Image: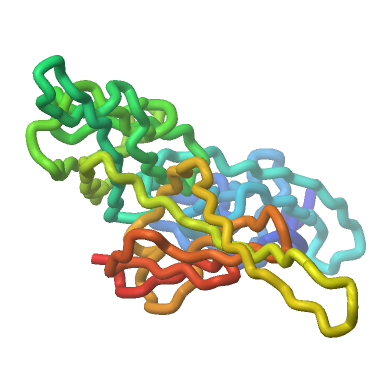
Amino acid sequence: TGAPKKVRYTIIDGNDDEAFALQTRKSTKESAMNVESITVDSDGKAGVWLVTNRPLDRETKAHYDLSVQASDVDELDKIISKIQVTVLDENDNHPIFKSTEYKFAIAGQKNTGLEGNTTTTWKRFSILGKVEATDADGDKIAYRLSAPNNIVIIVPQTGEIMLADQPHASELLIEVEAHDLRYPSLVSKQPAKVLLEFLAPEPVSFIMQHLEHDAINEHSHHREKRRVTRAVRPTKRIEFTEADGDTEGKSVFQLEKETDKETFKIRDDNPWVTVETNGAVRVKKKWD
């Protein structure tokens, strides 16, 4: 009998970024690996291991389709084996908030007592705002207050912040954490800071002015009487983050017209936003 023939194993396809390598079955951990090919004796006991050549990241690439060829040294006889590798998910990414700072405001309601005295209250279980985080692992996220308090609560599944009791001050600063629903769970490295403002019961309303022309003379030289009509639309509550107002002159919202002749004007002047006649609400001064 002659010496056993040699068999050459080669990764011929699918080895993106040299993620895998070949190693002899008899080798130790200290033995060298070969990314492209390796030759062993065909004595029935020999063979090769398909091993990782570097750490794999499921978020970068989750699936590999490898082709490994076995041939004689002259490559006269050969066979190809298809190998599918699926990278399992490891919980290695912390949730990240879309914004590290949020600012929400809610207007109170004025109540008049029997003796004529007035008080301001804020409706319980009103939604003040919503925080949001993402997870690169694609995990579901839950939210919680870093330090629980009696004034507000947070809905774990949605990140909505709700009023639980009457505030004791005009402002309240809270911190919110996000964590994924895995075991073990990972928590956001940086919590979101949320500033809550409890405003007096004077919601900002926009006064619409439009012109109606009443012709009083059907001749070519007719006179027109201009009549101004003012209308107050129902108050809308729209939430923005501080980042939305980072540029002066930036359009953050567009008021809808009910007629083409309508123009808009803000009733209560303020330092933060201005309203153009066409309904564009723009940043007047950078929000802080």
Q: Is 162 situated left or right of 170 in this image?
A: right
Quarter of the rendering occupied by the C terminus: bottom left
55 or 261, which lies in front?
Answer: 261
> Residue 287 lies in what quarter of the image?
bottom left
Q: Quadrant of residue 70?
A: bottom right
Position of 15 with respect to 193 (left or right) is right
- Kindly identify the residue that appears in the image at 38 percent across and 34 percent down: 159
Q: Position of residue 156 (x, y in %)?
A: 36, 26
At 18% from the left edge and 31% from the top edge, which residue is drawn? 120
Is residue 184 in view?
Answer: no
The image's colour scheme reads: rainbow
- Please, which residue is most extreme toward the top here? 114
Measured as percent of width and height from the top left, residue 125 is found at 32, 22
Can you name the residue that lies furthest to the bottom here? 221
Residue 238: image location, x then y, percent: 45, 47
On screen, residue 283 above or below 204: below
The residue lying at 73 percent from left, 53 percent from top is: 66
In screen coordinates, is 94 left or right of 50?
left
Residue drawn at the location 49% of the way across and 50% of the way down: 27
Give whichever of 56, 138 is nearer the camera. 138
Q: Is residue 257 visible?
A: yes
In the picture provided, is 47 more to the left or to the right than 214? left
How many labels were placed on the picture? 0
Above or below for 18 versus 230: below
In this rendered view, identify the residue nearer to me: 281 or 94.
281
